[in-house]
Amino acid sequence: MNANKTTNQNIQHIALTDMEPESGYQRATNPAQVDNIVKKFDETKLGTLTVSARGGKYHIIDGAHRAKALRILGYSHAPCVVLNGLTFEQEAEYFRSQNEDKRLIKPLEFFKAGLVSGDADCVEIYRIIRTNGFNIGSGSKDFHRISAIQALFTITGEYGFETLDDTLFLIASTWNGVTKASQSESLLGVAEFVNRYGMADFADRMKEKFSAIFYDYTEAARTRASSSSVTARKKFCRVLVEHYNKGLAANSRKRLKWEV
């Protein structure tokens, strides 16, 4: 049976909470593989997950390891090829017969297609990016070119468009030109900070500290507990709070309180 002849498919941005890993025909999720994806995460290589819309849920056919890694990293959504009309048995056949060397649609391509089609979220995200002096594009060595599309969707999905605007404004005014400052970890961590504490006097207290902040975040990601409640963005935000508080007296009203 050719599953492709019994179904139709489209591309959507699906909440990870609406996805369920399928069982019975897939190999078991390998924690070591998930950990490796987290440690070496490169959003430009994420590709799309393949899911089947069945029974009110999106059953993961391809991408269970990536989905779990995205949850650990603090993402809320993922770009997916959504298959409609498959039975459980047809999903298994689709999984078995997938073309292993197919070219996956990358998040950046997904976003650009959304712009062309007039998707409201993509259009508003792009407007905010351009307003703050950024653009979208592949590559990780240009501060003003953002390739972390998943991070942008997660920020707007979790906190709203205003938080994305504030996040990009703070990054641009605090660490202008620092390459890693406009990458995924920083975008998500600063957004978490803005959501918790607002803008505060972030730029004044955090200028020229990014190297130390990123080093401490890397150490925290390596040594601190990686429970599902402590995502990568919360770890980055906690490091931001620690550096924000440095030099402030213990009884200073400016000190920020960290709560998981």
Image (tube, grey):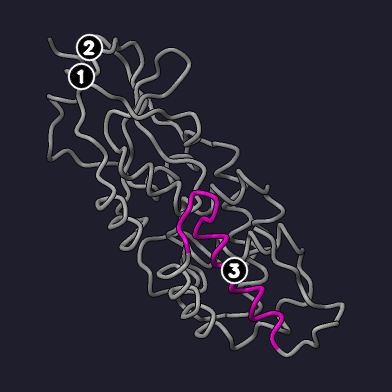
User: Residue 47, relative to residue 57: is it above or below?
Assistant: below
Frontmost residue, 79 versus 236: 236
The span from disc 2 to disc 1 (Cα, nearest Å) is 5 Å
Q: Which element type, helix, strand or loop, lies under badge 1? A: helix
Relative image position of residue 161 (x, y in whole percent): 67, 50
Do the residues bearing badges 1 and 3 touch, measured as CB atoms within 8 Å?
A: no
Q: Find disc 1 in the rendering and name its residue.
A: 92
Quarter location, residue 200: bottom right
Crowdedness of circle 3 by 10 Å Cα count: few (<14), some, many (20+)? few
Q: Amino acid at mark 2?
A: Glu
Relative image position of residue 138 (x, y in whole percent): 36, 61
Q: Amino acid at mark 1?
A: Ala
- N-terminal label among 2 and 3: 2
Q: Find disc 2 in the rendering and name its residue.
A: 89
Frontmost residue, 76 versus 132: 76
Q: Amino acid at mark 3?
A: Gly
Tell me the tag on residue 133. 3
The quadrant of the picture occupied by the C terminus is bottom right
Residue depicted at 85% across the width and 82% down the height: 252
Crowdedness of circle 1 by 10 Å Cα count: few (<14), some, many (20+)? some
Residue depicted at 64% across the width and 77% down the height: 242
Relative image position of residue 15 (x, y in whole percent): 50, 35
Residue depicted at 44% across the width and 75% down the height: 219
Q: Which element type, helix, strand or loop, lies under badge 3? A: loop
Residue depicted at 19% across the width and 21% down the height: 94
139 magenta-colored: no
